[in-house]
Image (cartoon, rainbow, N blue to C red):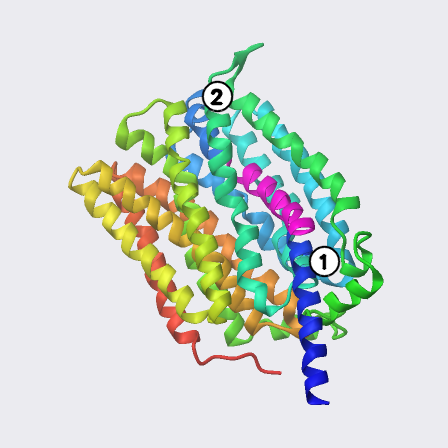
Amino acid sequence: MVHKKETCALDVEAQLGALRKRVVWRFLPLCVLCYFCAMLDRTNVSLAALQMKQDLGMSDAAYGLGVGLFYIGYLVLEIPGAIIAERWNAQLWIVRIMVTWGLVSSAFCLIQSVEQFYLLRVLLGVAEAGFFPAMLVLMSRWFGAEFRAKSIGILITAAPLSALLVAPLSSWLLTWDYFGWRGWRWMLLLQGLPTVFVGIACLWLLPNRPSQARWLTPEEATLLEKHTDSGPAGTHGLLHTLKQIGQPVILKLCLIQFFNNMAMVGCTFWSPLVIKQVEHMTPDQAALWSAIAPGLSLIMIVLGGWSSDRTQERFWHTLGFVGSCFAMLVLSAIFLALDNDVLSLGSLFVGYAAAYTASPLIWALAYQRCGGAVFAAGIGAINMVGNTSGLIGTFLFGELKEMTGQISWGLIALAVAQLCGLAVILSLRKTSLKP
């Protein structure tokens, strides 16, 4: 009898394993493509800035402020967007978000002043608010805890992948000069429109739940949903849910994401300009060199997620990569002060990759610690607070560079942020969510 039960369990596990492979190849690639579009439309301004700053008469501080204004929309709409995705329909919410942000992103090609740049950055943030929590809600309905860090890691590879693949294309587009438009305008237009079409395609290709996937039988869909830890939308009242996100564990996760995101966003938006200044390159050469750090990030994210899922350990993995980012940013600043450009850029690239690798591990921690009715609101709060660091970090980097004339002080500021993150991670070890 026992032998029969064990055989049955092995059969179910084998069937589940085969199903997961199909999900990885049929469902996850479109999630990555959606996130790829998000990262492209959010960060391609860092490459456009190589020409745009001069054309619009934009200072470093003004550029840093404009980049950071994107995150104002998150402050206002991130938690409501996450709750809508959980209680209504994550698939349709993602479609709405992608279509609107694709249109706004393309509109950047028309700007004629710094003030218009500020306005569209705010509108882009409003349009995209709630996207990442909606993706996590959607993925929680398809993947169980044992594949959590790896699946999020694969999703987040879209960020460095966008920089890696688009850098050569952007480098080429920056050389365009047609019909009175400089290359950066063509680049922003042509890289914004695909998001609209991908968003519309999600209506048919990105099912909200396994039970809605046409390529799964009802029995297969039931088996998948049974082995995820995400049930139906929470039934608690909205006020109760919002009170729950004030618990210490969620507040600490918010701070961890805040500090890591400050380093990650700072490296993303400023590294092309750092490369250009350090190595005295042309804009198109700097765009090509900026693909090195994303390429390294892809490798580290996959390996970090695989290691964390294999051991089902989240805390020490997160601590290790955040600590590595801190150390590399400090070394980059030191080598820069010593006029060792090669080691400075090498350290910056490794620090960039470590910050990106820590990101899916932080989300795996959040999945582990947040559940039930607090899930969507908790994820939304963590992402909202994390994204506010983009406003602070990019503006601070620009201000320090303009005040001191030195890039190294901006790198030190990002390193201090990661040091604060290390302290919060250590304090999280014995903190748990109360019912």
Residue at horizontal 51%, vertical 26%?
A: 169
- Mark identifier at residue 85: 1
Residue highlighted by disc 2: 172
Quarter of the image holding residue 357?
Answer: bottom left
Q: Is residue 57 at all visible to an observer of this figure?
A: no
Could you give the CA–CA distance between mark 2 and mark 1, rounded to whole angstroms?
38 Å
Quarter of the image with the C terminus is bottom right
Q: Is residue 349 magenta?
A: no
Quarter of the image with the N terminus is bottom right
Spot occupied by residue 41 in the image (x, y as percentages of width and height):
57, 37
Asked whether 392 or 49 is in front, the reply is 49
Amino acid residing under circle 2: Trp
Amino acid residing under circle 1: Ala
Residue 31 drawn above or below residue 123 = below
Spot occupied by residue 319 in the image (x, y as percentages of width and height):
38, 66
Residue at horizontal 68%, vertical 55%?
A: 23
Spot occupied by residue 224 in the image (x, y as percentages of width and height):
73, 66
Secondary structure beneath dot 2 equals helix
Quarter of the image holding residue 55?
Answer: top left
Residue at horizontal 51%, vertical 66%?
A: 309
Spot occupied by residue 362 in the image (x, y as percentages of width and height):
49, 63
Q: Is residue 287 at all visible to an observer of this figure?
A: yes
Secondary structure beneath dot 1 equals helix
Magenta stretch bounds? 25-44
Q: Is residue 43 magenta?
A: yes
- Density class for disc 2 (Cα within 10 Å; few <14, some 14-19, many ≥20) is some
- In this figure, what is the number of numbered marks? 2
Asked whether 33 or 213 is in front, the reply is 213
